[in-house]
Amino acid sequence: MALIVLDTDAASLLQKGRLPAALAPHLSGVTLAVSFVTVGELYKWAERRSWGARTRDKLEAWLHTVVIIPADRDVTRTWGAIAARADERGRPRPANDSWIAACCIAKGLPLLTLNLRDFEDFEASDGLQLLRGV
């Protein structure tokens, strides 16, 4: 079964049942994944927004249904390369977006995001596969 990586916003919207309908066809018959960065960002949101036990339990249950991509040697090597090239192009990217892109590029996985501008530079320059509304 194919794996599709969700960025943090897409993961959050999917959990809330608010993912735009145009993106739903990408989710049929696939296994969902998130990067270690997205897990951290979701936990940060839980802290910053003072989520209660019920909402945190929902998050934990959802995280058990997805594959979590860790920061292994391939991912960290890829991050170093794409971050350096982005700097050289004069287009430094936020660290968390770079890590998410590195996870996808290193593992050869597509990224489902609503924030295309955050990732289009990696698509054009580093081979990141972005999924768009269909």
Image (cartoon, rainbow, N blue to C red):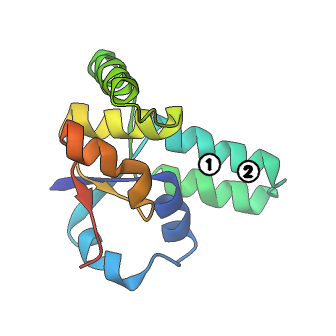
Q: Is residue 25 visible?
A: yes
Task: Left or right? Give the position of 15 relative to 1.
Answer: right
Helix or strand or loop: what does disc 1 sit on?
Answer: helix
Residue type at numbered disc 2: Ala
Screen quadrant of the N terminus: bottom left
**How many other residues sit within 10 Å of disc 2, few (<14), some (14-19) or many (≥20)?**
some
User: Do the CB atoms of the residues marked 1 and 2 lie less than 8 Å apart?
Assistant: yes
- Which residue was labeled with disc 2? 46
Q: Residue 107: percent from the left, percent from the top? A: 22, 35
Q: Is residue 65 visible?
A: no
Q: Which quadrant would residue 92 be assigned to in this image?
A: top left
| Between 125 and 72, the one nearer to me in the picture | 125
- Which residue was labeled with disc 1? 42
- Is the residue 82 above or below the residue 113 in the image? above
| Between 21 and 15, the one nearer to me in the picture | 21
Helix or strand or loop: what does disc 2 sit on?
Answer: helix
What residue occupies the far bottom of the structure in this picture? 21
Q: Residue 67: percent from the left, percent from the top? A: 36, 45
Q: Which quadrant would residue 24 be assigned to in this image?
A: bottom left
Q: Residue 106: percent from the left, percent from the top? A: 23, 31
| Between 21 and 101, the one nearer to me in the picture | 101
Residue ID at (26%, 56%):
130
Count of marks overlaid on the render: 2
- Is the residue 48 above or below the residue 29 in the image? above
